[in-house]
């Protein structure tokens, strides 16, 4: 018997959600420098990822991604400084949350 | 922007889940003294609720519900003492969890 949680950040009254899967998408786009390569690796549809990201930027009120010219390691689609900061804060929020829930569970439900 | 969580207790390697909806079902059965009346009120199917509860008792390893003879206020289907204790502990675990997540969110993501 163990607790399991799902966590999202909810924007705009619940219309747009951001969770672990989307955090992974942003991170992978930034690492690969390409939305196309990121969605291929994750087995997602380009069209739905693109639509989601536009929607997320709309409700967040700031750009998450930007295009850099050139084919070198700096070229391609990257996180904006603000997008990178948002992702970093999300990771800080998310990290340790499972452990906190496990500790709370052990204190309250335990082995029943 | 705000966090939202879903929480379950997972039994038997993830095959059986127990969360807020099921806690409400158990509580309502106990209050009404009847599985039939509880599922009707919740708009659930009797068959699936019955199947779920048998499955849950199987993985939990103890009876949650028991039948009491009589048509008085004590009669009908009620939580066993162990079932009541489990539900009480689940409520203690669950209570305050949302607030803890909100506090963590405010400390980490804030208004980004």
Image: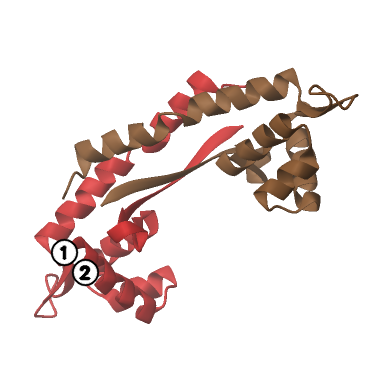
Chain colours: A brown, B red
State the residue in front, B35 or A34. A34
* Side of A15 relative to A1 (left or right): right
Q: Where is residue B1 in the image (x, y as percent from the top left)?
A: 62, 32
Residue B96 visible somewhere in the drawing: no
Residue A6 location, x and y as percent?
A: 47, 45
> Mark 1 and mark 2: span between their CA atoms?
5 Å
The residue that mark 2 highlights is B58
- Protein chain holding label 1: B
| Label 2 SS | helix
Q: Where is residue B88 in the image (x, y as percent from the top left)?
A: 21, 49
The disc placed on residue B61 is 1
Q: In this view, does A95 lie to the left or right of B2?
A: left
Q: Residue B70 carries which label?
A: none
Q: Which of A17 and B91 is in front in this view?
A: A17
Q: In this view, does A82 lie to the left or right of A92?
A: right
Residue A54 visible to the viewer: yes
Q: Where is residue B72 in the image (x, y as percent from the top left)?
A: 12, 75
Above/below status of B55 relative to A44: below
Mark 1 and 2 residues: CB-CB less than 8 Å, in contact?
A: yes
Q: Residue at x 41, y 78 (%)?
A: B45
**Would you call the spot at circle 2 few (<14 residues within 10 Å), some (14-19), or many (20 or more)?**
some
Query: For residue A19, what is the image quadrant?
Result: top right
Q: Residue at left 28%, top 41%?
A: B93
At x 41%, y 68%, the residue is B42
């Amino acid at each position: 018997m163990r607790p399991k949680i799902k966590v999202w950040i909810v924007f705009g009254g619940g219309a747009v959600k951001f969770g672990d899967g989307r955090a992974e998408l942003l991170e992978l786009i930034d690492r690969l420098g390409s939305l196309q390569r990121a969605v291929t690796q994750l087995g997602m549809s380009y069209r739905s990822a693109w639509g989601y990201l536009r929607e997320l930027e709309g409700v967040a009120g700031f750009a998450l991604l930007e295009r850099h010219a050139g084919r070198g390691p700096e070229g391609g689609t990257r996180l904006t400084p603000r997008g990178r900061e948002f992702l970093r804060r999300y990771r800080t929020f998310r990290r340790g949350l499972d452990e906190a829930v496990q500790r709370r569970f052990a204190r309250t439900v335990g082995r029943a």
